[in-house]
Image: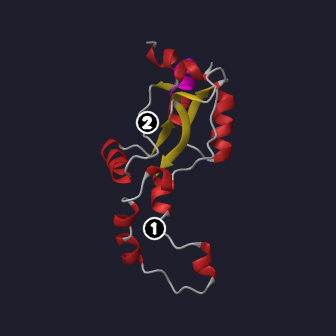
């Protein structure tokens, strides 16, 4: 079974110069944990919830310099500053993707190895879809068990 057979086509994308507030609104309203960033028809990065939230935490240098225990309430208020940035300020640019002609279990291996729940599907650098572990699990279930469960 190939990635192209089960991937989500035409995923929602955002531009690098999009305001982060608009993107996090989409994430919260539609329960997106991450979105591909597309520029000039090519995959430029990924913006994930962890990228946004990571900006609120002290850096390793701050911790090593003897910063006292974090003030979590102060850290929470930094969110307002973070969402005023652009997507390009916080997105991950070193993106791992899979090919639409790849076997789904090979794609799953890459995802599990990197602890990804979703991964972009690209063809010659162009985003053609998204693949989630849920897509893979559902396809394997349907291929192996769905018919048996429907029999009387």
Q: Residue 13: which disc?
A: 2
Query: Where 84 falls versus 26 (above or below)?
Result: below
Q: Quadrant of residue 53?
A: bottom left
User: Seen from this angle, which residue lies furthest top?
Assistant: 152
The spot of residue 18 in percent (x, y) is 39, 46
Q: Quadrant of residue 65?
A: bottom right
At a point 57% along the width and 20% down the height, the residue shown is 4
At a point 59% along the width and 23% down the height, the residue shown is 3
Query: Where 108 falls versus 149 (above or below)?
Result: below
Q: How is the image coloured?
A: secondary structure
- Determine crowd level at label 2: few under 14, some 14-19, many 20+ residues with C-alpha closer than 10 A: some
Front one among 84 and 80: 84
Front one among 88 and 71: 88
Does the magenta-highlighted stretch encompass residue 142?
yes
Element type at mark 1: loop
Image quadrant where one finds the N terminus? top right
Decide if residue 118 is in sight here. Answer: no
Element type at mark 2: loop
Q: Residue 130: which disc?
A: none
- Distance of label 1 from label 2 (alpha carbons): 24 Å
Q: Residue 56: which disc?
A: 1
Point out the stretch of residues depicted in magenta. 138-145
The spot of residue 141 in percent (x, y) is 54, 25
Image quadrant where one finds the C terminus? top left
At a point 50% along the width and 84% down the height, the residue shown is 69
């Amino acid at each position: 079974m190939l990635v192209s057979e089960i991937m989500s086509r035409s995923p929602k994308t955002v531009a690098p110069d999009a305001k982060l507030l608009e993107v996090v609104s989409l994430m919260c309203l539609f329960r997106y944990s991450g979105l591909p960033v597309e520029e000039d028809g090519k995959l430029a990065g990924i913006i994930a919830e962890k990228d946004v939230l990571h900006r609120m935490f002290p850096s390793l240098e701050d911790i090593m310099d003897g910063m006292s225990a974090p003030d979590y309430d102060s850290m929470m208020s930094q969110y307002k500053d973070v969402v005023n940035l652009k997507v390009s300020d916080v997105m991950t640019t070193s993106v791992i993707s899979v090919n639409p002609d790849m076997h789904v279990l090979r794609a799953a291996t890459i995802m599990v190895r990197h602890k990804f729940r979703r991964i972009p599907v690209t063809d010659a650098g162009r985003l053609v879809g998204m693949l989630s572990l849920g897509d893979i699990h559902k396809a394997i279930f349907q291929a192996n068990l769905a018919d048996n469960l429907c029999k009387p």
